[in-house]
Image: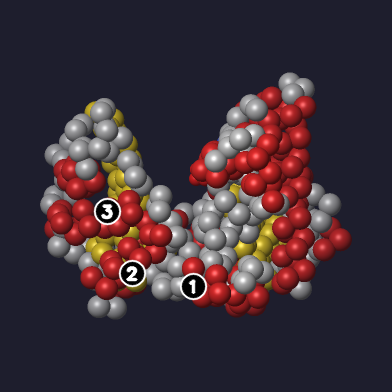
Amino acid sequence: MTILVINAGSSSLKYQLFDMTDSSVLAKGLCERIGLQGSKVKHQANKPTRIRDTEIDMPDHEAAIRVVLGLLTDAEYGVLKSMDEITAVGHRVVHGAESFTRSTLIDDKVLKAIDECSALAPLHNPPNLTGIKSCMAVMNVPQVAVFDTAFHQTMPEYAYLYPIPYDYYKRDKIRRYGFHGTSHRYVSERAAKLLNRPVEELRIITCHLGNGSSVAAIRNGCSVDTTMGFTPLDGLPMGTRSGSVDPAILEYLMDNEDMSIAEVLNVLNKKSGVLGLSGVSSDFRDLHKAADEGNPRAEVALKVFYYSVKKYVGSYAAALGGVDALIFTAGVGENNAAARAAIAGGLDYMGLDIDLDKNAAVKGDECDISAGGSRGRILVIPTNEELVIARDTEAIVKAL
Ligand code: ADP
């Protein structure tokens, strides 16, 4: 089965084409500046590698899908003879609210329900929906939606309710939803495989640390708590997002700095986190370089981030009643040994003992970085959200 995976943003569209016989990626790419001047596509075909990087007119997402299909079947850069070889399309959808607890075959009812979730994710769901509709317009194959929030729908009420009047939950749907669910699910399932134990027996804490970051507590293969909440602004400090702050700060800033609520939210989303604290960068590589050169604000920004992740690991260990596996994933989690050492160091009292040599030697592969005698395992597992989307799509299509 050949599955096309689509992740549509407001002006971008990422794609990967999977051969499900061996889960290999036949081709992948990124369309950027869709609907803007100078739109371009970067396409990579595999076996053998061929790259096409070019400006091409893409006035809307439907045009972008046509460009992608053209490249996938191109004589020089293609990997398919005809687009009829594509069995189905899997779409990343950010918000499924309480309507979607698992990946779903898309029909008119599902389209309507995704649209209804748009109020909760106004920046994400509308472009996701545009991506789906564009594919439906040019391809006559099953389309599947895979939601970032779905994995966290198993959280108990006491974990997802915010302590504000209950009516706001009922009327306005304000609750913790959590995001990065596809990634947390993938790495926790991989951990069970690597440890050769059923996921149903394990207490796992997953740290997805990238530009956006979240930690999740996973018991019996189900998410029971996570740091992102009603929106991806909650929880950990991130590249540019503040994470959780005292909500009273919002009004105080509005008064003291003469800002509107929109300006305050813009600061919390785009000018805070490690960028805001350091004044250097949102990128952890830049921060480490600056800290090594003696920049005290870069150093404190890193410390604030690591301290926050460590506190959540501790609180989720309490929530789970112990930890069998602590997992690091995403850009920082997979590549930044100093971050892992700072977060997982000193956790031996709860049975997690990191081996600093193994940690320093990680090279982008799955790796156990715990010391021989550690009761719980500490693992680095590169995430693969696209593969989860492809597999869910395959399973749904097979069952039709
Ligand atoms: P996103 O949330 O946008 O998907 P990523 O998961 O790609 O983000 O993570 C981006 C972060 O990962 C950046 O802060 C970057 O510094 C860090 N990162 C990525 N690659 C490396 C690397 N090879 N070494 C150290 N840090 C890295």
Instruction: Look at 38% across and 69% down and name the residue there.
Output: 103
Quadrant containing ligand 1: top right
Instruction: Look at 33% across and 69% down and name the residue there.
Output: 113
The crowd level at tag 1 (other Cα within 10 Å; few <14, some 14-19, many 20+) is few
> Would you place residue 358 above or below residue 22 in this image?
above
Inter-mark Cα distance, 1 to 2: 17 Å
Q: Residue furthest top?
A: 293
Residue 228 visible in the shown view: yes
**Mark in front: 3 vs 1:** 1
Disc nearer the start of the sequence (3/1): 3
Residue linked to disc 3: 130
Q: Position of residue 261 (x, y in %)?
A: 55, 45
Disc nearer the start of the sequence (3/2): 2
Inter-mark Cα distance, 3 to 1: 27 Å
Camera-side residue of 369 and 64: 64
Coloration mode: secondary structure
Q: Position of residue 299 (x, y in %)?
A: 75, 32
Instruction: Look at 41% across and 73% down and name the residue there.
Output: 99
Camera-side residue of 239 and 105: 239
Q: Which mark is residue 171?
A: 1
For badge 2, the amino acid type reads Ala
The crowd level at tag 2 (other Cα within 10 Å; few <14, some 14-19, many 20+) is some
For badge 3, the amino acid type reads Thr
**Mark in front: 1 vs 2:** 1
Q: At numbered mark 3, what does the secondary structure look like: helix, strand or loop?
A: helix
- Looking at the image, do the residues carrying marks 1 and 2 touch, with CB atoms under 8 Å apart? no
What quarter of the picture does the C terminus occupy? bottom left
Q: Position of residue 37 (x, y in %)?
A: 25, 28
